[in-house]
Image (cartoon, rainbow, N blue to C red):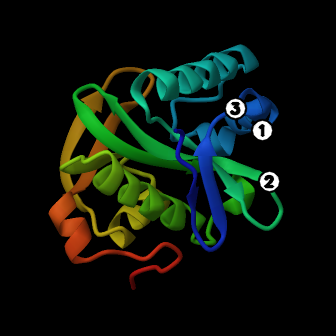
């Protein structure tokens, strides 16, 4: 069964082909993609979407599409994936949704999912060193900066932020609430 996560303002569900137009707009936005390896062509976005759908079928998890509960609009992506030896929860929203706490809310729900449903012991967030908004989200989630690493292109240098399942459960962040 494919999980659907819900928060007070969001629905997180696996990506579907019908998300292509929203994914393509997201991938073509230079402001959004500045921290994500650069603008993507429609073909690259389609390949990424297809890979995400396949990963759900193959592994039982991958990134979620973030849907605005009230409007039904596709907002961005959040979610777990394993790559380059990392167990990561990452996030990214279309620019119209920035600065409203949605990334923190979505990532908190995703952390509950990876720790409680998938049984992961720890997660990291690979954050560009100059991406202050994502550093803030990581802090609000209770993650701490662990290391500076070089990931394969197009990602490059990233700060690794992370936490353990034990730390998450000890200082659990309710979705929709933000730490000061």
Q: Give the residue number, with chain letter if any, for mark 1.
A: 22
Q: Give the residue number, with chain letter if any, for mark 2.
A: 73
Q: Earlier in the sequence, mark 2 or mark 1?
A: 1
* Nearest the eye: 30 or 73: 73
User: How far apart are labels 2 and 3 at the CA level?
Assistant: 14 Å
Tell whether label 1 touches label 3 (CB within 8 Å): no
Q: Give the residue number, with chain letter if any, for mark 3.
A: 16
Tell whether label 1 touches label 2 (CB within 8 Å): yes
From this view, report whether residue 151 is shown above or below residue 172: above
From this view, report whether residue 38 is shown above or below residue 74: above
Left or right relative to 167: residue 52: right
Mark 2 vs mark 3, foreground winner is: 3
From this view, report whether residue 148 is shown above or below residue 49: below
- Secondary structure under tag 1 reads helix
Q: In the displayed image of the protein, which residue is found farthest to the bottom?
A: 180
Mark 3 vs mark 1, foreground winner is: 3
What is the tally of numbered marks visible in this picture?
Answer: 3
User: How far apart are labels 2 and 1 at the CA level?
Assistant: 9 Å
Picture quarter with the C terminus = bottom left
- CA neighbours of label 2 inside 10 A, class few (<14), some (14 to 19), many (20+): few
User: How far apart are labels 3 and 1 at the CA level?
Assistant: 11 Å
Tell whether label 3 touches label 2 (CB within 8 Å): no
* Residue 114 horizontal/vertical position (percent): 34, 50
* Residue 65 horizontal/vertical position (percent): 63, 44
Q: Quadrant of residue 173?
A: bottom left
Q: Residue at x 46, y 45 (%)?
A: 79
């Amino acid at each position: 069964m494919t999980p659907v996560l819900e928060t007070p303002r969001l629905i997180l569900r696996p990506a579907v082909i019908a998300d292509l137009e929203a994914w393509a707009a997201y991938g073509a936005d230079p402001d959004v993609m500045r921290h994500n390896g650069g603008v993507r062509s429609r073909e690259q976005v389609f390949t990424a979407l297809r890979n995400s759908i396949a990963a759900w079928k193959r592994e039982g998890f991958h990134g979620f599409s973030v849907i605005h509960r009230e409007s039904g609009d596709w907002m961005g992506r959040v979610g777990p994936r394993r790559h380059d030896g990392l167990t990561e929860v990452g996030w990214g929203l279309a620019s119209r949704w920035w600065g409203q706490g949605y990334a923190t809310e979505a990532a908190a729900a995703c952390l509950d999912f990876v720790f409680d449903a998938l049984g992961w012991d720890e997660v990291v967030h690979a954050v560009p060193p100059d991406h202050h908004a994502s550093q803030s989200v990581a802090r609000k989630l209770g993650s701490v900066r662990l290391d500076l690493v070089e990931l394969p292109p197009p990602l490059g240098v990233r700060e690794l932020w992370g936490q353990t399942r034990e730390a998450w459960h000890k200082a659990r962040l309710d979705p929709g609430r933000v730490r000061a």
